[in-house]
Image (tube, grey):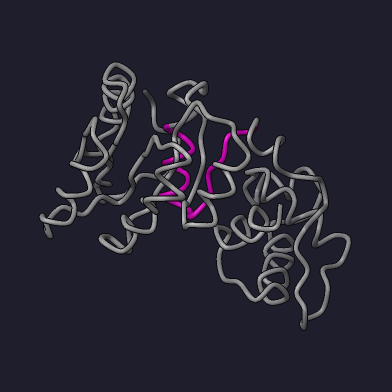
């Protein structure tokens, strides 16, 4: 599996909690083809994994792929529990479920991404790597299309509203495009796109793409 991204000396620790052993085993093997990834947690049981994370201070996944149901999010508040145990750990929901209540509950409680198991492993791998290297939020396209009304971006209560061009740039960021891809699509320079992004962050009082992503999904 060729890695077309900028490589670093860092090895990312990845964990998977999924009751489907065949799926999780195959996905983990796909990740481990890249030397930038190492498996630190591979569990079929959510409760056991939470206990292991709680009782093992040295176990620090950079990212956790989690298959979860609505009941576990709402009643047991699993994502909040995991974030309390490992505050720096990114959590990406990886499931077959497209339930809008599950999607909203996941982001409301601190999930950092939401991917569909129907995506091929290569797509999941590249989105996760992009997230870790560049802070790019991850979401499956079918989830994005299901949840997002085009140009329905959040507006700050106090600061100046986004311009039409800033809305356009922000929308493309939400769709997963890189700054370079946005510049090419809009026939603008990379510096211009970066200038727009600085204005967007300032006006929305945020600092990262992940915050923009979460703000938008919380509003839907």
In percent of the image, x 29 and y 32: which residue is there?
A: 34
Q: Is residue 149 above or below residue 20?
A: below
Question: Which is more toward the observer, 144 or 177?
Answer: 144
Question: Residue 207 appears at what percent x and percent y?
Answer: 57, 71
Residue 123 lies left or right of residue 83; in this view the side is right
Question: Residue 96 appears at what percent x and percent y?
Answer: 50, 26
In percent of the image, x 64 and y 61: which residue is there?
A: 215
Magenta segment, prevailing SS (helix, strand or loop)? helix
Identity of the residue furthest to the front in this view:
75
Q: Is residue 148 magenta?
A: no
Question: Residue 107 appears at what percent x and percent y?
Answer: 53, 52
Q: Determine the image quadrant of residue 192.
A: bottom right
Question: Residue 118 appears at what percent x and percent y?
Answer: 52, 21
Q: Determine the image quadrant of residue 45.
A: top left
Question: Which is more toward the observer, 139 or 220?
Answer: 220
Q: Is residue 119 above or below residue 131?
A: above
Which region is colored magenta? 125-141
In percent of the image, x 29 and y 36: which residue is there?
A: 16
Q: Is residue 139 magenta?
A: yes
Q: How many marks?
A: 0
Q: Is residue 29 above or below residue 93?
A: above
In percent of the image, x 48 and y 57: which residue is there?
A: 109
Q: Is residue 196 above or below residue 183?
A: below
């Amino acid at each position: 599996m060729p890695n077309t991204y900028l490589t670093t000396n860092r090895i990312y620790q990845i964990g998977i909690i999924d009751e489907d052993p065949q799926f999780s085993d195959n996905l983990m093997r796909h990740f481990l083809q890249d030397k930038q990834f190492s498996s630190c947690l591979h569990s079929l049981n959510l409760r056991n994994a939470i206990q292991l994370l709680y009782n093992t201070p040295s176990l620090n996944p950079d990212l956790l792929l989690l298959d979860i149901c609505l009941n576990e999010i709402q009643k047991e508040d699993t994502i909040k529990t995991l974030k309390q145990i490992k505050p720096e750990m990114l959590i990406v929901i990886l499931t077959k479920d497209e339930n809008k209540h599950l999607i909203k509950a996941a982001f409301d409680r601190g999930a950092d991404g939401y991917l569909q198991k129907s995506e091929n492993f290569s797509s999941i791998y590249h989105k996760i790597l992009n997230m870790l290297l560049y802070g790019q939020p991850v979401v499956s396209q079918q989830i994005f299309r299901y949840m997002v009304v085009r140009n329905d971006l959040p507006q700050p209560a106090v600061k100046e509203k986004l311009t039409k061009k800033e809305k356009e740039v922000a929308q493309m960021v939400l769709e997963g495009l890189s700054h370079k891809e946005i510049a090419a699509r809009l026939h603008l320079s990379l510096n211009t796109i970066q200038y727009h992004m600085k204005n967007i962050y300032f006006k929305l009082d945020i600092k990262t793409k992940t915050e923009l992503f979460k703000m938008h999904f919380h509003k839907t």
